């Protein structure tokens, strides 16, 4: 049994992948959870209305709460990890932001993850960073209308993703706040990505506690369920709770077997109506 009382949610883009996407919120409910999150669930940045309605209905009909949603992030299976810093994608991203805010209004979701993007050949890093800052400010101002927060995440992996550490992300958040006056942005602390990228988890969680808006977990190496690797996940979550973190902890791992055997059923449900 986990030693902390933080609330869990299931990432339905990486778990329950043996089922069609629209069945996953109900599968999460049947497994005992009542909070879910998704990466952008469509191929297009702005899919047809009936597809969006079907997604919203799948969440609401399953009686689960959508607590996190990624903005459109490009061709993820093809290696893209976000379009925030891509000048060629800015218009598409901003159209997506408007739609995400509508989905937030329809579901109650208030946390939205913006992947920064990979290094793009033949344009300067400065142009990518300036583009990302402008797009983040746009996203933050748009979701502010529904009381939303934009999350930014360090990501690991073989692609040239531009933000690898918590300090990289915090520097961007500071820039958006200072230059654009947008306060509703936060660090998404994914314990797996941070570890793989060489960040010192204890230091990051202590130093940036006040900037953390969301936490995701998977063990490392492997990105599998807690207990399959070397991260002291329970210890870090307990210290986070003791330090005052009250947000969600999302399960974002590739399951090696029965997905949730490590987590007693009575610890899966979160009290609906509480917010983070
Ligand atoms: O692409 C990933 O690994 C992510 O965590 C996206 O949110």
Image (cartoon, helix red, strand yellow):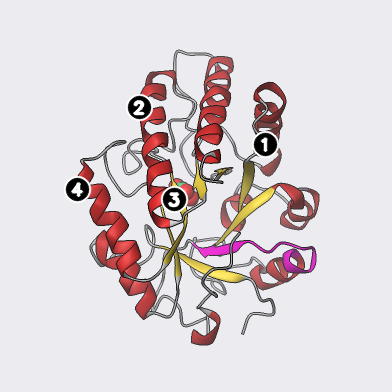
Secondary structure, mark 3, is: strand
The answer to whether 230 appears left or right of 78 in the picture is right
Residue appearing at x 40%, y 38% in the figure: 73
Circles 3, 4 touching at the beta carbon (< 8 Å): no
Q: Position of residue 27 (x, y in %)?
A: 32, 73
Circles 3, 2 touching at the beta carbon (< 8 Å): no
Q: Which mark is residue 50?
A: 4
- Distance CA(mark 2)–CA(mark 1): 24 Å
Secondary structure, mark 1, is: loop
Residue appearing at x 71%, y 66% in the figure: 236
Q: Which residues are magenta?
A: 240-251
Quadrant, the C terminus? bottom right
Q: Which mark is residue 92?
A: 2
Label 1 near ligand 1 (CB < 8 Å): no
Circles 1, 4 touching at the beta carbon (< 8 Å): no
Q: 108 or 114, which is in the foreground? A: 108
Q: Which mark is residue 69?
A: 3
- Distance CA(mark 1)–CA(mark 4): 34 Å
Q: Badge 1: few (under 14), some or many (20 or more) residues near its Cα, within 10 Å?
A: some
Give the mark, 3 or 2, whose residue is nearer the N terminus: 3
């Amino acid at each position: 049994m986990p030693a902390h009382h933080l609330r869990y949610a299931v990432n339905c883009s990486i778990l329950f992948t043996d089922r069609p996407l629209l069945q996953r919120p109900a599968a999460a409910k049947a497994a005992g959870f009542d909070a879910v999150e998704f990466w952008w669930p469509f191929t297009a940045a702005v899919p047809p209305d009936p597809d969006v309605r079907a997604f919203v209905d799948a969440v609401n009909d399953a009686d689960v709460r959508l607590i996190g949603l990624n903005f459109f992030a490009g061709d993820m299976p093809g290696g893209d990890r976000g379009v925030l810093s891509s000048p060629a994608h800015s218009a598409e991203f901003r159209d997506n932001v408007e739609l995400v805010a509508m989905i937030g209004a329809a579901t109650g979701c208030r946390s939205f993850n913006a992947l920064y993007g990979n290094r793009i050949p033949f344009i300067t890093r400065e142009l990518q960073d300036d583009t990302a800052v402008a797009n983040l400010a746009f996203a933050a101002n748009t979701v502010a209308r529904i009381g939303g927060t934009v999350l930014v995440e360090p990501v690991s992996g073989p692609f040239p993703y531009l933000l690898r550490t918590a300090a990289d992300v915090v520097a961007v958040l500071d820039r958006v706040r200072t230059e654009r006056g947008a306060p509703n942005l936060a660090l998404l602390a994914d314990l797996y990505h941070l570890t793989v990228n060489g960040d010192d988890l204890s230091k990051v969680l202590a130093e940036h506690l006040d900037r953390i808006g969301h936490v995701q977990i998977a063990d490392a190496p492997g990105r599998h369920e807690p207990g399959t690797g070397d991260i002291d996940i329970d210890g870090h979550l307990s210290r986070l709770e003791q330090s005052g973190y009250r947000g969600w902890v999302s399960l974002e791992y590739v399951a090696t077997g029965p997905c949730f055997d490590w987590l007693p059923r009575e610890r899966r449900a979160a009290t609906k109506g509480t917010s983070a």
